[in-house]
Amino acid sequence: MRYCGRKKQLRLWAELRDYDRFGGWKLAGWTEKPTGFYRLRKRDGFWWLITPEGNPCFYLGLCTAPALNWPATPVSGREYLFEWLPPKEGDYAFAWRRGAWGGDEHIDYIAFHTANLVRKYGDGWSAKAVETTRRRLRSWGFSGVGKWGEIKGLPFVPVLTRADVPCLVKHPEIFDPAIQTKFVESLRKQIEPRRDDPMVVGWSFGNEFDEIITADEICEILKKPDVTPAKKELLRRVPDGNIEEMRRCYARAYYEFVYRTIKSIDPNHLYFGFWIVPGWWENEEDWRLVAPYCDAIGYDLYSFEFGDERLIRLAEKSGKPIICGEFSFPPFYNGERGFGCYAVYSHDDAHSGKLYGDYVRAAACNPYCVGVMWFEYRDQPITGRGAGKEIGPVIGEHYAFGFVDVADRPKWDLVKRAREANLSAVKWRLEAARKNARH
């Protein structure tokens, strides 16, 4: 299909008048009382995300937008790979950073797409790029931004961190009152500025495996001095020394502390947990451990199908709504674009769009799922986004995840099919709920 110019296409698609500014559908035939914040409601056996204006919503997010200078690729020690590097002065300075992942402060990184944005938009490039991104997300049918991004005027899903809280092994010493105080203050500093912001869909904390309490971690705690609060408390609560029981004990205390702290600071916004990944854990008990301590269970799952038997079973067993923070089908382009093929991939943009539509439809028709978010807005650099120790042509992830490429060009074959699915998702869900009510 041939498309007209970028600006004309956005005008033709326009912003969607049947939806409120939070992604809620105004034509559902029913509403809830507006509260000024997102909330959850079960109706006809289906969980719904309700927008601050009271309209039902199936949340569709696009992660990392607007991604002005991320992802970036490491340069130090690999300068020979690049025919051209932008200067480190003027507008191009924003494309450079020193260190990106922690422990790599000696490494220079460059975001080539940032240099392309500077060249494309000229004076005031960053404001123009952000506004273009905002208009794109709205006209493409997205409710707002997903994880790892934020655009003024659009809903988003912020991820809280614990970078300034000391760890006992891999996690803070949750039984130590002094560490608890630091933990509370860390969360307070992050939450309070946005406590009354209706654009916050819900808080989350940490990400994926980083927040799983492992058996190895418990074993390391037991090697600590006897005065260590966590060691004392674990031995008191689990006197027979069962490592798995100790692991669950620590996890319950940790997840409950985070949940109750966030809710005490901000009782109005939802909490989605830490984006647990089914299968990337110690065992299935980790899903059950987190379930009581979130409003909806946030998870990430890269799979060709929305839900396998395990996900559906765990969702049904917990009875809680679920929300997918990351899924994707990056095109492989027969190897023409990069050096590797992602485990869950598509052949080209059109195929990626078809898989997107199938995934969104299945998610929208599931009684427990209240939204999904695609990772991510821009392609990753073919030389990798870093987080690796080796020096070579590729370091870290390097896949074509994006709805736009490194030259800020939309992938229209993906965009068109995704937009069709986005505008159908809430209708699919309503129809599935009506059928469920009739039976």
Image: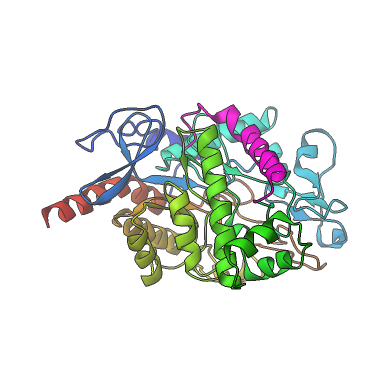
The answer to whether residue 301 is visible is no
The answer to whether residue 188 is visible is yes
Determine whether, in the image, residue 39 is placed left or right of residue 303: left
- Where residue 134 appears, x then y in whole percent? 51, 35
Determine whether, in the image, residue 156 is placed left or right of residue 216: left
Number of numbered callouts drawn: 0
The residue lying at 42 percent from left, 43 percent from top is 142
The residue lying at 43 percent from left, 68 percent from top is 304
User: To which quarter of the image does residue 93 belong?
Assistant: top right
Which quadrant is home to the C terminus? bottom left
User: To which quarter of the image does residue 391 belong?
Assistant: bottom right
Queried whether the magenta region covers residue 401, the answer comes back as no
Near-viewer residue (401 or 47) = 47
- Where residue 252 appears, x then y in whole percent? 53, 56
Queried whether the magenta region covers residue 178, the answer comes back as yes
Near-viewer residue (317 or 333) = 317
User: To which quarter of the image does residue 435 belong?
Assistant: bottom left
Point out the stretch of residues depicted in magenta: 175-200
- Where residue 413 appears, x then y in whole percent? 44, 55
The residue lying at 62 percent from left, 34 percent from top is 188
Determine whether, in the image, residue 291 is placed left or right of residue 125: left
Most common SS among magenta residues: helix
Q: Is residue 329 above or below residue 427?
A: below
The residue lying at 54 percent from left, 39 percent from top is 262
Near-viewer residue (302 or 379) = 302
